[in-house]
Image (cartoon, rainbow, N blue to C red):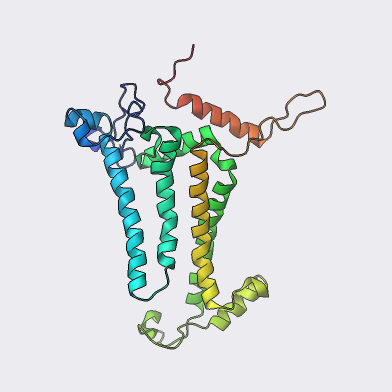
Amino acid sequence: DIDGIREPVAGSLLYGNNIISGAVIPSSNAIGMHFYPIWEAASIDEWLYNGGPYQLIVLHFLLGVASYMGREWELSYRLGMRPWIFVAFSAPVAAASAVFLVYPIGQGSFSDGMPLGISGTFNFMLVFQAEHNILMHPFHMAGVAGVFGGSLFSAMHGSLVTSSLIRETTENESTNYGYKFGQEEETYNIVAAHGYFGRLIFQYASFNNSRALHFFLAAWPVVGIWLTAMGVSTMAFNLNGFNFNQSVVDSQGRVINTWADIINRADLGMEVMHERNAHNFP
């Protein structure tokens, strides 16, 4: 009963859903932000109907990933390592917290949290765009740059290293046999990789320090995801993406549509169609 109007949305496979359409549906809008554990319901049937499992799963999940993040820090500390693994994992933890906890708090109901399913996630994304214009938010743009840039840098690094491995094997053996775990000598020619990439782009676009390179590979996507989580967390309180609607007018004051206006039309269409029976207009 996600919309709180006694018009339930079925998420289970038993109700005919497949892997794509199946989901754990968020708890009822009639419950809002109230804590709804099993013992607060009159029966299991009531608890299931009102979406109780969503709160149970989401809150335990957030506790679990936060604890896992702490575990990463503790293990690093005990082994005398630096704490950057825990710092990197904080990005997906922040992103999950944003869509499962901060956004519902800002909107006033767990029913606005992201459903735990594929189609439900897509619905959440479309409604989020309709209500908050997330595509025009600078922090979301930073997140896109983080994910796409991270993919590009990961592919470039992997292919550069693999292409400049020092041959230790014959043509008939796997190149992987040329590496022994724990060996002291470098397994690839970083000078050759630097020379290639420096010529492909320009000299100073290529890292000449392996440590700085690997820090960059970690930091780029992490900072991007941090910023996206911050963006969702601010849009939770309706500080939305940029609004350039009807920005261009002719000398008579008539609006000349830009892409911002086209996207706004799409947003309005999605907004009026979502929760279509939950709104009673006079």
Q: How many marks?
A: 0
Q: Residue at x 51, y 66 (%)?
A: 217
Q: Is residue 154 visible?
A: no
Q: Is residue 202 left or right of residue 191?
A: right
Q: Position of residue 273 (x, y in %)?
A: 47, 25
Query: Is residue 191 rendered to the left or right of residue 45?
Result: right
Q: Is residue 197 above or below residue 220?
A: below
Q: Position of residue 21 (x, y in %)?
A: 33, 37
Q: What residue occupies the far right of the structure in this picture?
A: 251
Nearer to us in this view, 269 or 31: 31
Dividing the picture into quadrants, the one containing residue 58 is top left
Q: Residue furthest left?
A: 43
Q: Position of residue 196 (x, y in %)?
A: 60, 77
Q: Is residue 143 above or below residue 233?
A: below
Write the residue at 51% across / 63% down: 219
For residue 180, side relative to residue 145 (left or right) = left
Residue 261 in percent (x, y) is at 64, 32
127 is higher (above) or lower (below) than 199: above
Res. 57 in view: yes
As drawn, 116 above or below 158:
above
